[in-house]
Image (cartoon, rainbow, N blue to C red):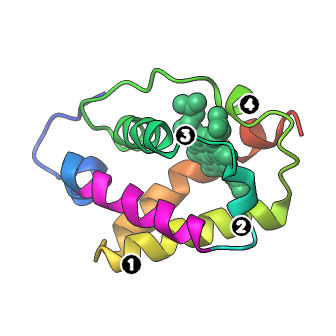
């Protein structure tokens, strides 16, 4: 949901829709170059994933979007995800945020909202 008031929302601190688009693009380039996890994405439609991730992050950061995709448990079921792969993915996102000059506070705020999804993502491995 969208935030009212004068302090910038996390969505705004990430650069709004254009900023999130660029972050997701960099993130997926990092993933494509990461031998630790690229295999998980071998059969994924990357254009669809990019659009879904943009919507997810927009929603999570209090932007004007509603994520309409599957639950995190369903989206990742039976992939064989491990703690190491989870950490590698977070690492790729962190590098994308740094490359796009997102400040430390906003980076940590986004990662802090993603961390609680760990249990859902890992539920059906
Ligand atoms: C906080 C952690 C994570 C979040 C918030 C997240 C979020 C998402 C979202 C929103 C989608 C799109 C779902 C859809 O629209 O169908 C997705 C798909 C996907 N995720 Fe994640 N993810 C996380 C962790 C991971 C990890 C650790 C991996 C592997 C290393 C991973 C691999 C994938 C793959 C391969 C897909 C595409 C599945 C397909 O082709 O249908 N995700 N994720």
- Disc 4 versus disc 3: distance between alpha carbons? 19 Å
What span is colored magenta in the figure? Answer: 19-33
Residue 57 is situated, as x and y percent measured from the top left of the image, at 41, 44
| Residue 123, horizontal then vertical, whole percent | 84, 35
Which quadrant of the rendered structure holds the N terminus?
top left
Residue identifier under label 3: 45
Answer whether residue 93 is visible to the viewer in this image: yes
Residue holding disc 2 = 87
Respond yes or no on whether mark 2 lies under 8 Å from ligand 1.
no
Give the percent coordinates (x, y) of residue 26.
40, 66
Q: Secondary structure at mark 3?
A: loop
- For image coordinates 48% across by 67% down, the residue present is 29
Mark 2 lies on a secondary structure that is helix
Q: Please indicate whether residue 50 sits to the left or right of residue 38 in the image.
A: left
**Label 2 crowd (10 A; few <14 / some 14-19 / many >=20):** few
Point out the frontmost of discs 2 and 3.
3
Along the line of sight, the residue nearer the viewer: 119 or 18: 18
Sort mark 1 into few (<14), some (14-19) or many (20+) by Cα contacts within 10 Å. few
Name the main secondary structure of what is drawn in magenta.
Answer: helix
């Amino acid at each position: 949901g969208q935030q009212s008031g004068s302090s910038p929302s996390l969505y705004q601190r990430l650069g709004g829709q254009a900023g999130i688009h660029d972050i997701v693009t960099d993130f997926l380039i990092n993933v494509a170059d990461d031998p630790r996890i690229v295999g998980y994405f071998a059969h994924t439609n990357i254009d669809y994933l990019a659009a879904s991730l943009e919507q997810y992050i927009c929603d999570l950061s209090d932007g004007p979007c509603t994520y309409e995709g599957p639950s995190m448990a369903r989206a990742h079921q039976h992939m064989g995800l491990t703690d190491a792969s989870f950490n590698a993915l977070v690492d790729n996102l962190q590098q994308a945020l740094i490359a796009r000059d997102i400040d430390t506070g906003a980076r940590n705020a986004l990662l802090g909202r993603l961390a609680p999804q760990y249990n859902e993502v890992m539920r059906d491995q």
